[in-house]
Each structure stands twice: as structure tokens, then as C-alpha cells.
Image (cartoon, rainbow, N blue to C red):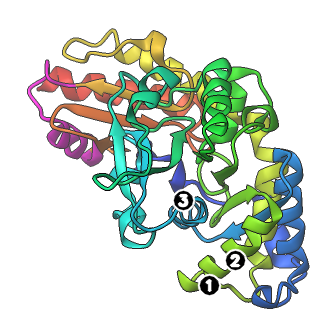
Amino acid sequence: MQKIDLRSDTVTKPTPEMREAMAKAEVGDDVYQEDPTVNRLEERAAEILGKQAGLFVPSGVMGNTIGLKLHTEHGQEVICDSRSHILNYELSMLAWFGGCLARPVPTADGILSWDVIAPEIRQVSPHWAPTGLIEIENTHNVGGGMVYPQPILDEICDRAHERGLPVHMDGARLFNAAAASGFTAQRIAEKVDTVMFCLSKGLGAPVGSMLVGPRALMDKGRLYRKRLGGGMRQAGILAAAGLVALEKMPLRLAEDHANARFLAEKLATIEGIRLDASRVRTNIVFFDVSGTPFSAAQFAARLAREGVLMNAMGPMLVRLVTHYDVPKELCEVAVKTIENVLRKA
């Protein structure tokens, strides 16, 4: 049985070009900063994002953890969306490693605005923890892959900087945001202080994420990376795939977005499934199965037996994520499989 894996864009396999680059990679010891392929990846990532320097890290969680730590002191608060990845899916590294408390702000779709941020900013006081940082997630995973409108993002950065507050972007799917918005990744990240983006999600590399920002902060971040166990040796084998991912894979992300819209439009016509297909902007589709005989977990388990994999994200919410390993024709098979399962139910 062929598996159609729509659980996440992290499940992609490296392309033949990535595998060839990995096999031929020039390597050295990256802890000594002597791996030429890692150095090239870090320089290229910084150049593409318009920042001074980059840092190659094993995972997005590590990249965010370092980024948050660079801007804050123990005992401060970090303002973020209430459904943000750093709050809900990163094992509380903000507290465990960073020594900070999240100040979550509820939003309808994961998109913060200055109007809801400003009332949550706290100054130094004998009674409460001061705000040290504002964190945004673009695209927003649990918000359904939503993209920050650029004027809203710019205003957050401008107003935050006026108050002396830095802004960190969890841009795990930053290049999806670029493909959907029409803005370059550099323009999107222009005013934020640091950015983390994943090479191992929509860009398809087997391992790794990038943190980019001011050179002095990246130099300090290298020390935090070592403390977290992220000091790698001949990591050019991984960075070589990352370079291919960075240069080639953003060009095809619109295909994933089109496939997500196709899935959403088809699912919206199936009795028992609820979603607003018009809100699907990137490669993430959430839908409600409360009108079916299944809970989300039961629905996902039943489809898994038919070879279609997806994730339950709540009692009645299911998430699908498109990527380059699931082309249009397999999306069509996935829809037919869902229709068949519900018809039999």
C-alpha cells in the first residue's frame, strides 16, 4: 500500500540533488568554524535574509531557543500568540533554558497586532516581570498557515523598537510566507531583529534550521548552541543539502499551496467535514470532523489504515500539510480515500 503522508512537511525525503551534494560535500570541523560548506550556508542564509550573519542549528526548536535567549534576561516575559509554537510545542524551552515567562495573547488566527500587544507590555516594577521580547510566528502553524500582513508586521517592529524591545520571528515556514504574500523573505524579515527558519520543512532538507541576525548576536548564539549540544563536527554533509534546499526549493512552494487549496476545496464539499477553504493561504489545512462519526484521533487512525496519514490537533480538528513528496495526483487519491471512509461509516 502506498503511503500518502500529509502529517507534516517534515516527513519529506532529500531530493537526488541534495543526496549528490551531501556525497560530494567539502567538510571540516564546524566547532572550529572550519567547515567550508557550513560557512557558505550561514553566509548565504544571512545574505538572502538581509542580515549580518547566520548560524546553522540542528533543529527549529534549538534555533528559537537560542534566538529567544539572545534577547532576554532571566525573569523577563516574552509576548507571543497563545497558540504559538514556542509556547505549546517546544517543551517549555523558553522557561527551561531561557528563564523567561510567556505572556500569551489570544488571537483569532495567530496574527498579533500592535493594538493587542501594547496593553501587555510591562515595565520594570517591584511587582511583575518586565517585557523583554516580542515573538511572532510567520507562517502561523496552528493558525492554519496564516501569513502576517506586511503592514501589521512592520508596525509591530517599529513600535516595539520605539520602546526598546526586540522582535524575534519564528519563521519556520518563512519561505511559504514569501511565496504566498509576494514579498521576498528579506522584505518580510527586514525589521525583525532575529529570524529562525527551517530547512527541513517545506524546503525539504533532511536536517537543520538557520538563525540569522546581527553578527555579535550570532557569535553569542554559537556559544548557546554548544551549551545545548548543537556543536557539530563535519556538518557540511548536512549543510550541503541545506544549500540546495535554500537555493532551489522556495521556487516550487506555490505548488504545495495550490495542492493545499485543492484539498481544502474538495474537503469542504464532503458531508460532515467543516472548513473555510478561502482561508487556506499556504500549505496547511485544518478541518473539523465533528459532523462525522469520528473524533479527530479516530478519523486519523481510520485513514492511516487506508494509507493516508494526517495529524489530530484537538478533539475534533485534523491537520493536513502538503509538501513536495505528495504531488497533485496523490492529493486526489487522499480525497477519494476520505470520501470512501466516510461513506462506509
Residue occupied by mark 3 = 68
Closest to the observer, 203 or 177: 177
Q: Residue 235, how many percent across, how many down? A: 74, 80
Mark 3 and mark 1 lie on one chain; the one further toward the N terminus is 3
Closest to the observer, 342 or 273: 273
| Residue type for callout 1 | Lys
Q: Residue 69, how many percent across, how many down? A: 54, 65
**Mark 3 residue crowding within 10 angstroms, few (<14) / some (14–19) / many (20+):** many
Residue 171 is one of the magenta-drawn residues: no
Determine if residue 190 is in view.
yes
Give left or right: position of 107 versus 169: left
| Residue type for callout 2 | Arg
- Which circle, 3 or 1, is nearer the viewer? 3
Which secondary structure lies at badge 3?
Answer: helix
Q: What segment carries the magenta color? A: 289-305
Residue occupied by mark 1 = 226
- In the image, is residue 229 above or below residue 253? below
Task: Give the label on residue 222, or none.
Answer: 2
Cα–Cα span, label 3 and label 1:
16 Å
